[in-house]
Amino acid sequence: MGLAGVFGLWAPAVAAWAQEDPKPSAEASVEGAVELRGAMPDARRLSFAELQHLPRTEVRTKDAHDGARETLYGGVLLAEVLKAGGLSFEPGMATARENARASLLVEAADGYRAVFALAELDPTLTSGLVLLADTRDGRPLDSVEGPWRIVVASDKRPTRWVRRVTALTVRRD
């Protein structure tokens, strides 16, 4: 079965899942908070200040709209944000198998959504970096992009670079 067939079968399931979840609250986007929801031990709202205190990193990537230009994003690895919600990324095989079966829905204030396999975010399984960024080239993100945005440096196109992130929902099936 080709990729079109796989995505054709998967799309209705993702669409149904997305409709099950409540919309992110307007309060979350205004305050810069991010709601952690779904199958995680400590589902809650992380304030902007709490997110700022998580371990920070920077990712240099090609500009999403001008491939000849590089951009430096700063923020928190998405795995660290999920750890704040109680998820485990321990190196054991049982944890890796659990994470391989789970997915993450990232939601934006404007209703845009993107899905990640949790294994894509697990630092024990991949070297790819997915960042919840709050700065671009050393400056806070503007109101069009931020206060938080997803940056996936390894993606060839920025379709999962969700702007104005308000909620992260983990699903285990």
Image: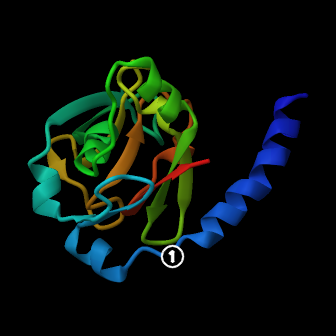
Q: Left or right of 139: which side holds 30? A: right
Q: Which residue is mark 1?
A: 22
Q: Left or right of 123: which side holds 142? A: left
For the view shown, which residue lies furthest in the bottom direction? 26
Residue type at mark 1 is Pro
25 or 42, which lies in front? Answer: 42
Q: Position of residue 3 (x, y in %)?
A: 82, 32
Looking at the rendering, which quadrant does residue 38 occupy?
Answer: bottom left
Q: Left or right of 17: which side holds 82? A: left
For the view shown, which residue lies furthest in the front direction? 94
Few, some or many residues within 10 Å of mark 1 (<14, 14–19, 20+):
few
Q: Position of residue 163 (x, y in %)?
A: 41, 57
Q: Position of residue 1 (x, y in %)?
A: 91, 28
Q: Position of residue 12 (x, y in %)?
A: 78, 57
Helix, strand, or loop for circle 1?
A: loop
Say above or below: 35 vs 83: below
47 or 155, which lies in front? Answer: 47
What residue is at 45 percent from the left and 18 percent from the top? 93
What residue is at 48 percent from the left and 37 percent from the top? 118
What residue is at 39 percent from the left and 47 percent from the top? 150
Q: Left or right of 45: which side holds 160? A: right
Say above or below: 32 vs 72: below
